[in-house]
Image: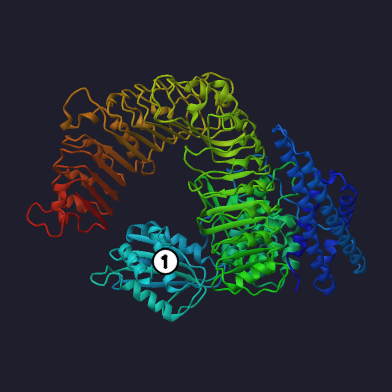
Amino acid sequence: MADALISSTIQVTLERALSLASDRIGLLVGFKKDVAGMTRSLRLINAVLADAEAKQNQDGAVQEWLNSLEEVAYDADNVLDELHYESLRHQVESRNRHKLKVCCFFSFSNINLALRWRMASKVRDIKDKLNEINQRAHGLLLVSRAVVTAALPAAPPAGDTRNRQTDSVVAPMVGRADDESKIVKMLLSPSEKVVSVLPINGMGGLGKTTLAKSIYNNHQIDGHFQKKIWVCVSEKVPRVELFKLILGQLNDKKDEVGDRQNIVQEVGKELGKLRYLLVLDDVWDDSQTLWDDFFNTLTGLNPINPPKGSWCLITTRLHLVAHKGYPLGRLPGDHCWSILKGKVVDGEEVPNELDAIKDRAIQICNGLPLVASVLGGLLRLRKDKWRSILEDRLLNLNEAMQILQLSFDNLPSPAIKKCFAYCSIFPKDAEMEGDMLIELWMAEGFLQVDLKNKTMEEIGEYYLEILLQSSLLEEIRYDERRCYKMHDMVHDVSKSIMSKSTKVINSEIGSEDNSNQVRCLVIESFGDGAKNLFESRSNLLHTLFLSQGSLSDDMLTKLKNLHVLKLSGVQNQNLPISIGKLTHLRYINFEGCTIETLPESVCKLYNLQTLRLKRFVLKVLPKGTCDLISLRHLHFYTTKEFQMPLNMGRLTCLQTLEFFNVGREKGRRIGELGSLKNLKGKLIIHNLELVKDKEGAEEAKLSEKTNLFRLQLEWAHDLEGDDYNDKDVLDGLRPHPNLEVLLIFFFMGDQFPRWLMDLPTTTTLLESATTLPKLARLEFNHCNRCRELLPLQNFMSLTELQIDGCDGLTNLPGDMLHLCISLQELRVTNCNNLISFPLDLQQTPSLLLLVLTCCPKLKTSMTPKGFGFLTSLRELEIGPFSDDGDDHENSSIYNEFDWSGLISSSSSSSSSALRKLGLIGLPHMEALPHQIQYLTTLTSLTLRDFGGIKALPDWFGNFAALEKLWLIGFKELRHLPSEDAMRSLTKLKLLWVYRSPLLKERCTPESSGPDSQWSKVSHIQHLRIIG
């Protein structure tokens, strides 16, 4: 059977070998002639590769030739990489030798001569094998043929691509509204059962998970169930593992040791008293015994008084006999066409050429939304072959798996095919971090070619983009973090493609394997079989993921060609020093294990590109870290007391450095950052009090770091005395104009430098009016000596501003945010001496959230005005404020607040109404501001520290939209609004009361008499009253 990946593997490996041969190693004395001969053979073989791929199905000899070529290609790559390593070693040792007073030239030269003899023999051996392979190609009549592959789409511009616009965001569900409505109606219907079960069943690719997600996030579901749990099963698991998965979603305790009884008890504590919705996604076990036992256990979580009406929604391809399912049908053709054309033209007009193949495309989709999405992605990539793809290649295809395979076949380069297939090393439904994927691809050598003048990381971003467009990956965003998932059918395709070169060993899967092509090994269960396979294949491995057991010195020594090493689950193991002998190693991931120290020998890994370590665990980095000459990504964060290794500035390839702790001695000062010109992403700089002056700060050269988008600057928070140079230091830390996020902590200057605050107000080009035109988030935290903030004029990209704990501020100017028209979130908190902040809110028309709290001297008359202009405001949290008088019991501290503007903006239309309000009062206040009764669109209300109030007013009944109410610190509160008023709050689902002891006594089922409040709250689903 033909290997779908072998040609891509060979081509990528050959290209990498050619790249190495053309690099500096080709210039090493004594190797030029042999390396040149090897290069000629590599090019000749590469030319006939396409012909061999086309003939491998019909000719077993060609298949055998390809297998031989793959092995030799790997050998050539390994040998050339050894030469590359020696070149790097020579470079590091030469650099270090110049730093020493005594040089050991004699010993170095002898070692070098011995190495040259050994390497020369290897190079000649590979050259001879390649010549033989080339001769066999002639005998097989393999010829050079022109290959017309898909043209790579236009590459994105160089630089950061975090904010690129893609079509990977999950689109609105197409064609399943009726299904969703029917299932939601079932789930909301009254039930006498403790737990009811509804399987959504159907073949793969119908969109079962998409439908379940839409139901899970339906607002009616949120209002009905007290708890929601989503569990992705994706494989057959024992019952106890199923409960562990549920517990992990509830309280993150799934990894705690315990038997089934303990685990079920923990689940019972979380769910036993609640009506819940449990979704089990992608179930693969139809054992009736398992499910009877599982649901019987769920039903018995609360044997005394279980609430009724909980549901378990299951998505599965199976037919679970005991439970009447909801069979999901195929999508109508028009809906499939809508999905497909959305992928191809993305909202633009449908060209005639696409419209002409509509009927054939609908026929091929066959009612499967996954096929429609993947086929649309394929047609988007291959616009040159629309009709031929549909008519020729897909004429007899009826299965989704074949269409997924075709999409893989049409990926526009061998390297992209390798990147896609490599994803199968992760389990089904795994969320793969984008940066991690790129680093792994880079370590395996997949990102060497295709795009000129691009870094390997930029090529990786581009390949991700193509896989997203092809619907072979889907993207998930978590704030600044990007992850990717595969549909389980897509995962099946990638796993099939990689089946010969990847082996996963766990308790369910055996470890027998006779293949000599295993390059990737995932060991989840380290038994005798795993050890045997490891022993027999260790010298071939490029990737090893080990999640159980540990690596001995002997085991490491055998992994001589390893590129990727990931350990997880290893506790407090001291790594053997032999790790320094893995000269090909480019990627180390110890994020999943508590390794506290790394051996110094790690610093001999001159090819190492990525080092990932568990946060806060490692006590010290090796002294020779600066020798990791190829290191590009150091993922590690710890406390500001951590001492940086000396001379980090020598790591000139470094792009990812999460933090830098400034030290006093040479080699640990801030100037080390100056030579790290390629830093990108996020950087935190601690201990800035150790920087002497502006000139010292300028040595960091932050203004030259074009790809740094987030910068956090921190001084010590506990310094004594008055001799601060913080203003000068911050002046020297001026960032590049591309910066998007700037956070400043414990700055002790009396004002901020000119580059941040004192800006021009008139200019012909507004975008040039600020030194940070892309700044979107700005924070000033605990800058206690700062006396004033000058206007942040013309920060037109600013969306978030926070001023917290700045006790030196007494006044903030009313025009502080002039032309900050994009500002969406403004927080001013814990500024104990702030008196005045008369902000003109007309300057911030896009404001969504305003927090103005814990500024006890701030006068109400000097708070922001112009709420009537804030048609976008959704959340407001304010108080307490100061007042000239002492009449706190009459809530006068809020009298001069701009209630009229707030009420007018909220009542103008429901779409522009305030949704969340938080008010903080004073311990003796006896009344709430009466104006809030007119904010009838509120869905959430938090009231805190109105300590003198004894009864809440009946106008609470006006809050018809209120869903959540928090009452905190009502020490004298005895009475809630009248029963009629409380019953008017028909949407109220949550009431939490804290630090209100008198009300607690009256809000229990046991309370009675005229003062009892229980009847007013007993119907509320989420009720918590804590004295």
The image quadrant where one finds the N terminus is bottom right
Residue type at numbered disc 1: Lys
Judge whether residue 499 can be spotted in this image: no
Between 90 and 765, the one nearer to me in the picture: 90
Label 1 sits on residue = 244
Judge whether residue 699 can be spotted in this image: yes
Looking at the rendered structure, the secondary structure element under dot 1 is helix
Q: Residue furthest left?
A: 1009
The quarter holding residue 719 reads top left
Q: Position of residue 237 (x, y in %)?
A: 48, 72
Left or right, 464 with respect to 4, comes to: left
Between 123 and 424, the one nearer to me in the picture: 123
Left or right, 506 with respect to 462, comes to: left
Between 174 and 81, the one nearer to me in the picture: 81
Within 10 Å of disc 1 (Cα), the crowding (few <14, some 14-19, many 20+) is: many
Between 1027 and 759, the one nearer to me in the picture: 1027
Left or right, 237 with respect to 492, comes to: left
Please, which colouring scheme is shown?
rainbow
Q: Residue at x 34, y 27 (%)?
A: 865
Q: Position of residue 149 (x, y in %)?
A: 78, 57
Q: Residue at x 87, y 60 (%)?
A: 130
Q: Is residue 286 above or below residue 337?
A: below
Q: Position of residue 827 (x, y in %)?
A: 38, 34
Q: Position of residue 901 (x, y in %)?
A: 32, 32
